[in-house]
Image: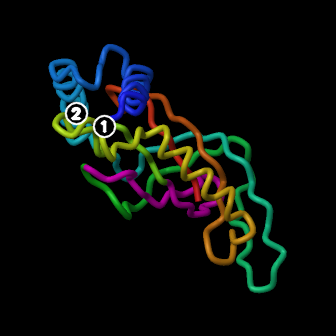
Amino acid sequence: MPAQLEWGLEAYVEGRFPGVHPRDTDAIERYHAQLETARRRAERSPLAWGQSYSLALTAPQPNPRPNSRRVPSVPNLPRISLRLNKPLQTGVGKMSQVWTAVEEKTGTTLVLKIIQPSMCPYPKVDRCWSGYMEPADLAHREVWGYERLALKQGLLVPYFFGLDTVRSNFFFLHGSCTVLVI
C-alpha cells in the first residue's frame, strides 16, 4: 500500500474510531467484539410494528411537471410523529432497515430508511477496512443523491422529506441511528 494511502486510511480510522489503528489487529478485534455485542442486543430487541419516532423534517417542493405525483400530506412539519407499520427490508448486514410508517394524526404513509449502525455491515479485520462505509457517510451519500435528483422527485423517485437522527439507548453501541424519510 502506498505510504500516502496508508496514512489516509490511518487518519480515517483513527478519526472515526478513536483508539482503533488500522494495523492494530487487537484493537480492531476489540471493536468488532463491541459491534457484535450491539448487534446481538439489536437482534434481541429489533425494530417492531408500533414503535414511534418524533422526527424533524421539511416538506419537499411539489414537482410542477405534468404527471408528477402530489407531495404526501404531512401537516405537522417540521416535527412529526411516525409509527412503524410494515417492514420492507430488515436484517443483519443491510445498509438500512426499511419500513413503512404512518403519520399519527393524518394516517399518511411514508417510507423510513433507518440506518442502524449495529445492523449495518462493518469492517473486516482481515481486509484492512476495504469496502467499508461508515453509517454516517452512507446517510450523507443518500441525502446527496436525493438532492441531485430533486427535479425527478414525484416523477421517477419518491419525494424526500429529509433525515433526522434518533438518539436512544435502543440503538446501543452508537446511541443513535439516522432516519431518512421518503
Which secondary structure, mark 2? helix
First-in-chain label (1 vs 2)? 2
Which of label 1 and label 2 is nearer to you?
1
Can you see residue 100?
yes
Residue drawn at x 60%, y 45% is 163
Position of the C terminus, as image quadrant, is: bottom right
Q: Using the image as rendered, state which of residue 35 and residue 86 is in the foreground.
A: 35
Q: Residue furthest front?
A: 2
Q: Eyeballing the image, is 50 above or below 19?
A: below
**In the image, farthest residue toward the bottom:** 67
Residue 35 found in image quarter: top left
Residue type at mark 2? Answer: Arg
**Side (left or right) of 62 relative to 169:** right
Q: Is residue 100 magenta?
A: yes
Identify residue type, mark 1.
Ser
158 relative to 67, above or below: above
Depicted 43 relative to depicted 125: above or below: below
Q: Magenta segment range?
A: 93-112
Residue 51: give x, y in percent of width and height: 42, 45
User: Is 78 covered by the magenta stretch?
Assistant: no
According to the image, what is the colour scheme of the structure? Answer: rainbow
Determine the image quadrant of residue 152: bottom right
- Label 1 sits on a secondary structure element that is loop
- Give how far apart the Cα atoms at labels 1 and 2 are: 9 Å
User: Could you say where residue 133 lies in the image, as x and y percent from the top left?
Assistant: 39, 43
Question: At 28% from the left edge and 25% from the top edge, which residue is drawn?
Answer: 22
- Residue 118: image tag: 1
Closer to us: 93 or 62: 93
Position of 102 with respect to 121 (left or right) is right
Residue beneath label 2, please?
41
Q: How many marks?
A: 2
Does residue 99 lie above or below 14 as drawn? Answer: below
